[in-house]
Image (tube, rainbow, N blue to C red):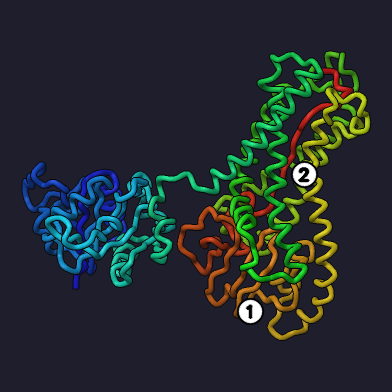
Amino acid sequence: MILKCLIVGTGDMAHGLCHTYDINNESGSDFALEVSKPREEYYQLESNNDYFHDTGVRISNLGSSLHEADIVILAIPASALSAFVRKHAKDIKKDAVLVDVTNSSVKGQDLESVCFVPRGQGDCSPHTLWVKAFNDNGAIDLISQKASRKGKLCTKVCGPDREAVEKVKVFAEQAMGFQTKVVPYHKYEEIAVHQENLGSEWVSSAWVLLIIFIFSEIYSLLRYNVYKGYDWIHLPIQMTNKAICWTAIYGFALTLLPGTLMNLRNAFGRDKLQDVGQYMKWALDIRKHLGLLSFFLLVIHVVMSLLIFNPAYYGKFYMDPKAAVSKLNLKGELSMFFGIVGFSVYCVTAICSLPSVGMEMNKRQWGFAFGPTVWFALCCGTAHVLTMGVKGWTKQDKWPGGMPPITLTSTLLPMLVIAVKVFQLIVALPPFLGSTGKSTAAAGKSSFLDGTMKDPIDDPVMNDSINPKSTPSLTKIEQGDSFSVESPSSSGLKEEEHSGDAFADEPNDVNVPGHGSYLQAPEDRASSIIMGESVGTLNTEQDESSNV
């Protein structure tokens, strides 16, 4: 039996869906696709062989096609959904499924609202079988697809009727080449306006960094322009550069703190997921986004610093600041060394976060890249700042306006986070060492030799109750500083983590553990630059001995 589908609409979205069908569906298959104008009075068919663009999809008469279609994809403006459904409710096949591909944020402009209007209101009852799908794909992305592409497009399918959802899922996968993920209907609101929101994690992260930046900018101009007498013409770059790097290094530290606190919490045996508070979940969710924005600020800091890196601005870094050409002194060499190393390592983690790179990494590689590596880079970034002005910290009588140096204020949080991590390692390592013998001796348990168990520096909270390959129940583990919940990946069950994965809305693939939802796998590939781990290298300020 042929499954017939009709796309109502002839815009870019309809074109993209038809193109996807054309490059994935084999001739003679059990699927058929047609396209019609939503208002056919404006379009007269010249013949029965009219095709939509170069897709090979036939343009059909709306009325007759609605009577025959098993699936009706409404690729029309969201504001027109209600009117179209009410007008053509009697023409639509009784058991046909309507598909909503819109992303309107206006209440009532989706099929969920249209199809659940009580019967008796209006001239006809709305159609009740509906599904939300394809709204997480852009028209340009669909149109630009090629048959030679190795990967599959992904889409989420959600609706109140399981049979309707399954019907659309089968057509999307077999006729259009999509990889689909069925989203439970009670989670509908999370996917309803996929293309029309910035994402709460991005907004929250931006606000956190904006607040830090405003505070640090005001602090910088008060300390240097008001109390120290710097000319106000230096506010756009020299002063703002200090505020930007202060904000960035705090952002890097904040991406590490939630995971470290969760690991510390687990080390004391409080391992019930429901005990995690709302604010901790929020902090875990925004780590990736916070780290990406911090990386953006870091790049700005590097560019600004290069523009003004000379003896006139950074005299304390040179052996003879007044000379036309001078070598760096020990302070300058050390500061730049830590800065360059930290920034370079952070760039490596940024590259590892790319989907094309991350999905090729195994669990141990991922754990190393986003575990000890990012902590090393954060330590380098902190050392980069400390070497600039640590000597001026004790000279309180020389602090302009009694305000501490920015080299002190900007490293307080990073040093605190590093101290918490050291404390966590000290607290968690003894139980880990005490259980290693049990873990490796027990049948089926993981070991360091076969690579299924991480080193203590990677996973100081692991104990003999955790077996990534055979444990049938959910257990907590540590991946660097990612709070995670693990289930057996080898059996095809999903592994998830509090990371706000960049691919969190894409379908899960057993062989590619970087796909998940609210929780994400420890070996998450595509999560982010900052999966609870981040690196920073910042140049904050000169101390009171500056020649600027």
Of circles 1 and 2, which is in front? 2
Drawn side of residue 146 relative to residue 244, left or right? left
Q: Secondary structure at mark 1?
A: loop
Q: Secondary structure at mark 2?
A: helix
The residue drawn where x is 69% and y is 72% is 452
Label 1 crowd bin: few (<14), some (14–19), many (20+), radius 10 Å: some
- Return the x and y of residue 284 as percentages of the image width and height: 63, 55
- Return the x and y of residue 387 as percentages of the image width and height: 86, 35
Residue type pointed to by label 2: Leu
Q: Is residue 20 above or below residue 271?
A: above
The residue drawn where x is 34% and y is 58% is 133
Q: Which image quadrant is residue 423 in?
A: bottom right
Q: Earlier in the sequence, mark 1 or mark 2?
A: 2
- Return the x and y of residue 502 as percentages of the image width and height: 53, 53
The residue drawn where x is 49% and y is 66% is 509
Q: Is residue 198 above or below residue 157?
A: above
Drawn side of residue 416 relative to residue 262, left or right? right
Question: Would you say the residues marked 1 and 2 are in contact, meaning their CB atoms lie under 8 Å apart?
Answer: no
- Return the x and y of residue 294 as percentages of the image width and height: 65, 41
Residue 413: mark in rendering: 2
Real-space Cα distance between discs 1 and 2? 37 Å
Label 2 crowd bin: few (<14), some (14–19), many (20+), radius 10 Å: some
Residue type pointed to by label 1: Thr
Q: Which image quadrant is residue 158 in?
A: bottom left
Drawn side of residue 206 relative to residue 308, left or right? left
Quadrant occupied by the C terminus: top right
Residue 38 visible to the viewer:
yes
Residue holding disc 1: 471
